[in-house]
Image (cartoon, rainbow, N blue to C red):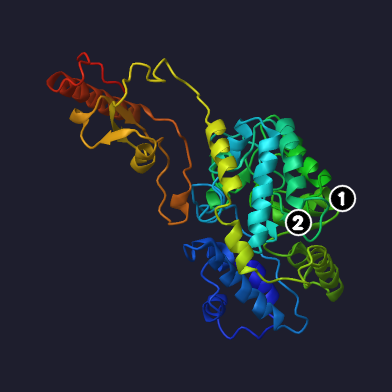
Amino acid sequence: MIGHVLTALLAVAPLAGSASSFIDAHDLGGNGVADVPHAAAHASRRSIRPRRAQELAHQTRLGAPITISTEPRHSFTENIGTGFKAGSFSGWPEVLGLAATWDSALVCKFAEAVRQEYRAARFRCAPQPTLDLATEPQWVRLSDTWEEDANVAAKIIVPYIEDFHGDGFGPHSLATLPKQFPGGDPVENGEGSHFSYGKTATYPGNNFGYHLVPFEAAIAAGARAMMYYFSRPIGTKYEEVGFGFNKGTVTDLLRKFGGKHVTDMLVDLIWNGPVTEEHIDTSVGRLLREKFLLRLFDNPFVDPGAAERSGGNEYFVQLRREAQRRSRTLLTNNNAVPLRRAPWGSEFYIEGFNKTCMEARNVTVVDKPEEADFALLKVEAPSLPRSGAFEKSFASGSFEFDKEEKGAAGQDLRRRLRDLRQLRRRFPRRGLRPGQARM
């Protein structure tokens, strides 16, 4: 992302203006290389901005290449700052859906697809897997998690990380950057820690150590770095400051495992004043070692042909379709589905479903309730209203309907059902009995 780009390019020339003016001047895009797959319909166009960034890096005194990373971009949903739509990459379920298949072999195939498609576009680092545990059901990023059970999550992510790296970490690998250490899920009221009201991490039952289990497994599997979450721990032995600036979690807890960490600011700069040249040399050495292992100095540029071949890989397309089917999980039913009484050719009135997708599967969709045999309605869970554009992309707060909302929603559903039944009596179709239309 753009932070990686700017870090490597500052030596090109002093920034005459803001960072945004530098980005605009070199046409790196408002979100850096992160939006490359959306730059054009053709997969080979993914190579444009990564190549431009590497060309700029090549002009620096030492010509050190950039290690370009991207947020996850293999699902059908998009949320600013946390993930992007697949675009010309193969589209898979969110990792929560992959975990629901209970198939580690399928998860490994997903990792292989990500590794090949990212490498073709010269993304060589992925800030994943997300190792937060789904212990707080209100957390705004629950779909990014694998599991609520720490041991199950640890078992899943070990082969996942190993497949990202391939047969030993080297030129064919995709570096992993697990997050968000030491576990971002237990935030008070399930809020997001991008915002001030989500700054507090709580640990009911003193279960701080429970959240570390998947991180320990990731480190043992060879994770290359670690990303911190923004929250602060409350009620633990650690100081009540943000994890990324917390000596107890950065130095005492994580550093004992070795490797490097990613923070928004250098901890030593915060606590001890100006960073020494020796400290910088040590950090740069770690980063350069990673670049040499990935062979970025040998070949940092994107091969447009490889990028084109990776787009729409039929094998990966078939795998992701299988994953989509197997990830579906029925929570409650009450004998509503399957619609065993629906005769062939039944027509459906829908709300909240994708009409194009349903019609592609030979489902006849009509625009008016009175024309339908069945009605399928999807009711969106409530969330707290937010004012900021970034905040609005996170559904937060209680997902339970309060009494007033329950009453209003219930009345609305009952009204719609009553109307549909009345329409059924007025417009009987295919010999169905009045009132047979279902929701």
Residue occupying the point 40% across, 53% down: 387
Residue beneath disc 1: 256
Question: Residue 173: which disc?
Answer: 2
Q: Quadrant of the N terminus?
A: bottom right
Residue 5 image offset from top left, x and y in percent: 64, 71
Q: Is residue 27 visible?
A: yes
Residue 13: which quarter of the image? bottom right
Task: Return the x and y of residue 297 as percentages of the image width and height.
Answer: 78, 72
Q: Position of residue 120 (x, y in %)?
A: 65, 61
Mark 1, secondary structure of its residue? helix
Residue at (45%, 34%) from the top-left corner? 399
Q: Mark 1, residues whose alpha carbon is within 10 Å: few (<14), some, or many (≥20)?
A: few
Q: Amino acid at mark 1?
A: Lys
Q: Position of residue 363 (x, y in %)?
A: 34, 33
Q: Amino acid at mark 2?
A: Ser
When the figure is inspected, residue 341 is found, relative to residue 179, above or below; the finding is: above
Looking at the image, is mark 2 or mark 1 nearer the viewer? 2
Please tell me the numbered disc located at residue 314.
none
Residue 129, visible in the rendered structure: no
- Residue 121 vs 188, above or below: the answer is below
Q: Front-most of 387 and 410? A: 410
Q: Compared to 181, does 403 lie above or below? A: above
Residue at 56% of width from left, 33% of height from top?
A: 327
Query: 160 or 326, which is in the foreground?
Result: 326
SS at badge 2: loop
